[in-house]
Image (cartoon, rainbow, N blue to C red):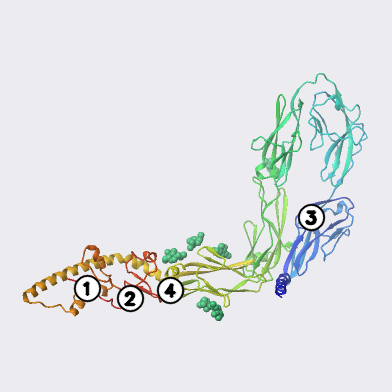
Amino acid sequence: MHRLLIFSIMFCISYGQEARPHPPKITTPDVEERIYYKINDEVILACQAEANPKAQYEWTKDNEAITSDFIKQDPNTGELQIATLTRRETGAYQCFASNQIGSKTIKAMSPIITVDLAYLESWDETGLPPPRISAIEGEAVQLTCDNVPACNPPGQFKWYQGDDDSSEVVQNERIAIDAEGTLHFVYVTKSDDLNGKKYQCAIFNRHLNSINLGSGKILEVTKLNPIPDRAPSVLYSKSNQKALIGHYVDIECIFGGKPIPAISWKNNELELITGSSTDKYEFMDTSRRVLRVKNIQESDEGSFTCEGANTQTNSAITALNVTSRPIWEKALSSITVAATKEASMTCQAKSVIRENPPGPPEWFENGASIPNDKFESGKYVFSDNQQILKVTDLVKPDDTTCFQCKVTNSEGFRFGDGCLDVIEPIVITLRPPAVQEITKGDIVNLTVIAETNSPFEIRYKWFFNNQTYDDMPPFVIFNDTSKSAYINTEDLSFENYRKINGTYIRMVYNAHETINITVQVVLKEVAVVGPATAAAPDLWWIALIIGILLLVCVIVIICVVCRRKAQEGVYPLDKKERANDLDPEKDLADSGFHDLSRADDNGMEKKGTPLQFTEEPLSYEDDDSLAEYGDGEDMGKFNEDGSFIGVYMDKKQPAPPVRNGNETQI
Ligand SMILES: *[C@@H]1O[C@H](CO)[C@@H](O)[C@H](O)[C@H]1NC(C)=O
Ligand SMILES: *[C@@H]1O[C@H](CO)[C@@H](O)[C@H](O)[C@H]1NC(C)=O
Ligand SMILES: *[C@@H]1O[C@H](CO)[C@@H](O)[C@H](O)[C@H]1NC(C)=O
Ligand SMILES: *[C@@H]1O[C@H](CO)[C@@H](O)[C@H](O)[C@H]1NC(C)=O
Ligand SMILES: *[C@@H]1O[C@H](CO)[C@@H](O)[C@H](O)[C@H]1NC(C)=O
Ligand SMILES: *[C@@H]1O[C@H](CO)[C@@H](O)[C@H](O)[C@H]1NC(C)=O
């Protein structure tokens, strides 16, 4: 039963997502690619998109609609078919997936697939006898590979010796073939002379797995005894070479000389390259003639030096020019944004350092140029050198659309595609007051109620004073039935009550939208106590001084009266007189001043019970709570019913009970 329920909920959710109309999202092809085919091959290109309603497909070739009878395409499946490929059908293919949302046709464009033909042409028959090359033993010799036929993709060179096609020349310390096909002998020996038979250059096409042999060359070597030593000479090196970011590059250096020069390399930082393979560098042969620089970065730009050393040394320098088509900093991509908000489509690319940056991107909407009135009306706004296209004040479904951008620099271009999907926004139907001034006993209202018609589930998160709370900030109560959130300050202890002020944020969000509801909670009383506390010491001193003066007066008066009584007979001072007229402490207390128990410290007479302002003796929660508001004196506190009892100004407090007359011994 439970499982059935879960299943049906999951079905509803996935069905809900699926059923929502949304722009096509092309899943195949997903990256740009160059594919080599053989002549007359059948070519099938697939295009697939997730879309609702279902996408229709159309391919373009070299940015134009396809009209050729030799290229077939199915608008429903997205498949393109070339029955037999010829050079005519090669080119840059791009797929459009389109559907209808609202009244508009939305088109997403795929990355570019380049259909290329792999071929290897034959060598021209010159009809001439093979050229003869003469050399003396110990000399460096080069046999060039001439009239090389066209080969796509670029082929690999090999050399064969004799009439036998199967005897390939093996490269070793003394024999090397360079990137352009030349066969080098670091120094020749008589054994390299094939007695009138020829060396034959060949080119190998790996895609076709075929090899074509060219006309050959005859090498005649004159014997010499002994073979003299020769200083290193540079037989092959390129003064500069292009390297593409992210790819690798092979730098090659071939030295002639006898004994065979040992080769060492320094990188662009003039550091000796050691080890035969690291993350960055690898020697492609044991003689270290070919250095591979891997994962090219801008930092690899600079001069690489190769040195050949036998008894003497020689060196060659290759300047590596690191370059690239535009490099994405932020490629255009699909986004989902709630209506009423604004969307930023970004198409941001750079060139490598020290090269001209790409021009501003060219933008397209649904495969066509964007009509100018969109910009004139302020609906679309360019910024950041046209790298950002803002769509303002989104409307569903009118603003659901796809954009394309093209960024170009000296090395080529890059193409981006991204769709804007506009969904129903989250609507806050109930939000609490943004600033709440609270008195102890009040309710802090933190109730937020949000709704949406979009299929994306609304979630909530709390923040309080920059802290994230997965459940709830301290003291917040959440009623799951009424969805209300609040703090009941009545139930809080004084200490906890003081902790609730600050900023509460209720983050209301779904997969595509975030709304922050902020509530500032300010405690009213805490603000009142502050200044009063500051004023207290002055009043206290004044009270003390007046008190002392009054006491002295009273004592003087009493002494005078006593002496007179002693002379005239005893007259007892009646209680009423003492309480109402002659008690200075009471006068002070009535006028809002402190008790005078402090006088004890000054060596004055002992007083009775300190002044109290409530019926019951006060009990403080702890010493800390007092410390913040004064130095331990009776300055006021919160009553149990939450009302605050101030000591300084409140004249309406019941008159403090005055110590009994019999407590004071005068
Ligand atoms: C590197 O190549 C680029 C593109 O071909 C060129 O514009 C630039 O001047 C070259 N840089 C150097 C240092 O040769
Ligand atoms: C919280 O505030 C909202 C909006 O001011 C109000 O509608 C709601 O009734 C309040 N809730 C409580 C529990 O006071
Ligand atoms: C929260 O963070 C902001 C920004 O970092 C800061 O200005 C503010 O004072 C912080 N508030 C609290 C209560 O820590
Ligand atoms: C939660 O709210 C409902 C409806 O307003 C109310 O009936 C219920 O008593 C509340 N529950 C608690 C624990 O406060
Ligand atoms: C809370 O109030 C106290 C006292 O007024 C103040 O010092 C403190 O900064 C406040 N805290 C926050 C987070 O606002
Ligand atoms: C919402 O508030 C949180 C916490 O302060 C913050 O991390 C987030 O970026 C805010 N989101 C928005 C959209 O303002």
Mark closer to the chain start, 1 or 2: 2
**What separation in Å lies between label 4 and label 2 (alpha carbons)?**
19 Å
Nearer to us: label 1 or label 3: 1
Report the amino acid beneath label 3. Answer: Ile
**What separation in Å lies between label 4 and label 1 (alpha carbons)?**
39 Å
**What separation in Å lies between label 1 and label 3 (alpha carbons)?**
106 Å
Within-10-Å neighbours for mark 2: few <14, some 14–19, many 20+: some
Report the amino acid beneath label 1. Answer: Glu
**Residue 636's x, y, as percent?**
35, 71
Q: Are marks 1 and 3 in contact (CB under 8 Å)?
A: no
Report the amino acid beneath label 4. Answer: Lys
Secondary structure at badge 4 equals loop
Mark closer to the chain start, 4 or 1: 4
Residue 88 versus residue 472 in the image, above or below: above
Q: Residue furthest left?
A: 567
Residue 371 versus residue 428 in the image, above or below: above
Q: Find disc 2 in the rendering and name its residue.
A: 614
- Of 343 and 222, nearer the camera is 222
- Of 630 and 130, nearer the camera is 630
Number of the label disc, if any, that sits on residue 440: 4
**What separation in Å lies between label 3 and label 2 (alpha carbons)?**
89 Å
Report the amino acid beneath label 2. Answer: Thr
